[in-house]
Amino acid sequence: MRVLTDADVVTVDPEVAVDAARESLRRFARGELAAPPRVSAELGDLDYYYTTGGLPGGVSGFRAYRAGTPAGDQLVALWDAAGSLFGIVVGDELGARRTGALGGAAVEAMSDERASTLAVIGTGKQAWTQVWAGSAVRSPELVRVHSRDERNREVFAAEVRDRLGLRAETVATPASAVRDAEVVVLATRSESPVIDSADIAPGAHVTTVGPKGRTRHEMPPELLERAAVVTCDSPSQAAALPDFLADPARLVSLGDVLIGAHPGRESSDQLTVYCSVGLAGSEVLFADRLFGAISG
Amino acid sequence: MRVLTDADVVTVDPEVAVDAARESLRRFARGELAAPPRVSAELGDLDYYYTTGGLPGGVSGFRAYRAGTPAGDQLVALWDAAGSLFGIVVGDELGARRTGALGGAAVEAMSDERASTLAVIGTGKQAWTQVWAGSAVRSPELVRVHSRDERNREVFAAEVRDRLGLRAETVATPASAVRDAEVVVLATRSESPVIDSADIAPGAHVTTVGPKGRTRHEMPPELLERAAVVTCDSPSQAAALPDFLADPARLVSLGDVLIGAHPGRESSDQLTVYCSVGLAGSEVLFADRLFGAISG
């Protein structure tokens, strides 16, 4: 059995991660990815969560993570078709990069191909992995960064320059970040909208990673009304949430766009939205790809 | 993070295992062991099961195992109080030895102290770990072994002699195995009684590890009527089973006997029964003990 940690996960190229995300989304759309609802067990102040998934007759396993104090390390475990537990991944990077890679697949499938400006609101790990994966599917001339903390913005922009080799600038307001941007990533913990709908360009693609409940959401609900297409990596998981912002009937499975079962964006002036919920089973396929990509 | 396998688990002395089982049972009886119901997720032909448990403010984690074909390796994962995933145990030995150790604690708490004959029906892994743990709490002069397959009996008896240093003999019928035995272990997959109640001596202690449903059971239900005390490692888990043989109202928590909250056996002619269900959380405390016992 092999064990990988965050130090290994961060060496993986975003192209590899996005390719694994595409495979998860496509297989999910074709009914080939088993991805049952998350289950949990309560231990007093600490909850253990298990998202299980895999390919029938192929690799399967789960991600285990904890909610509470301290949340602690996450764990992904993989079994092969013969029942051998062949890999363990410990740490928080895999889950975040998996989420970023699904977002990268969304940007590739939904944003204008000529997108030249990527705006990001938020500078945490989720924001980073969205930009990291987005850089693998588009070649933005500029990444505009905003968050409430000025120092965080500067650090984030410097990392975009240093690690991704992209031009990056920080801006003082969300409006100046998103104006004219063809790709907008919202990755905050904000429970009230961090931008005005009117500031978003007509043909933009918007990804929301943070809160998206009916009463608490980082994205203005008006964007859903304006959007020509609203996708989600797992509409069934979204529908199972007690308080999801978007009408489940409107949610298109992102995988359906990837396999051509839904047309997705049909013109450069359509606004599109991707709601990230974390497709179950995608961690397992991503981790499986990692073991292939990182020589043992 | 340390990783242990079956090769490590089998080196642990039964005394260490039974001591960990005692701790789990005592803490459970005192309300100090968090042991919520098992949860599961279905992946087509394969189900993943998670039993979560631990000490509030202390070690916690889970055992994951699969039902289906192939069942494959089991996994136990442990987090410390600070949230660090510090240990992984891979393989089937830990679960079986944990069950054996709980059975050892039952034999210690419930059987006649002067027990000189231990009878075992069944020669699989569960039968072995019950005898293994029983040898740590009693000093039987004789282990009598019966199973349907003559060759399995001989192999099992030879292992009792070689590995536990006890006198062992094989017998051709269940009745001749259990007659006059002060400790009787039933560890079969049989769905109909493997012994007659009348063959069990008045003051015997009987442990049943195998099927114990109302319609499918290895133990004759008459033994429950004869028994002065019927314990279970987790009466709440037993009560949650849809079809448990024993009336939940009669089940005494084995931990209550260990901490003196229930008197247990009160004379040498009382018959006692222990129904093994696998106390959740006991794998976690056992695995934690393993990491302490096996130097890294």
Image (cartoon, coloured by chain):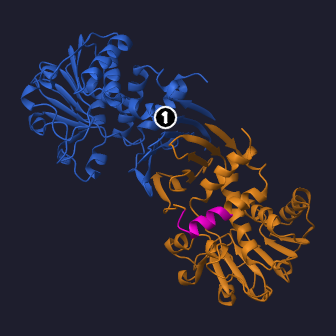
Chain colours: A blue, B orange
Q: Is residue A113 magenta?
A: no
Q: Which residues are magenta?
A: B22-32
Q: Which of the 4 quarters of the picture holds residue B25?
A: bottom right
Report the number of numbered marks: 1
Report the residue that reaches farthest toward the left. A198
- Whether residue A81 is visible here, answered yes or no, is no
* Badge 1: residue crowd in 10 Å (few <14, some 14–19, many ≥20): many
The image quadrant where one finds the C terminus of chain B is top right
> Is A259 in front, or is A226?
A226
Q: Which residue is mark 1?
A: A91
> Is A27 in front, or is B153?
B153
Which residue sits at x=29%, y=23%?
A: A152
| Residue B274 shown left or right of residue B213 in the figure | right
Secondary structure predominantly adopted by residues drawn in magenta: helix
Which residue sits at x=36%, y=13%?
A: A164
Residue B126, percent across and down? Answer: 72, 62
- Whether residue A17 is visible here, answered yes or no, is yes
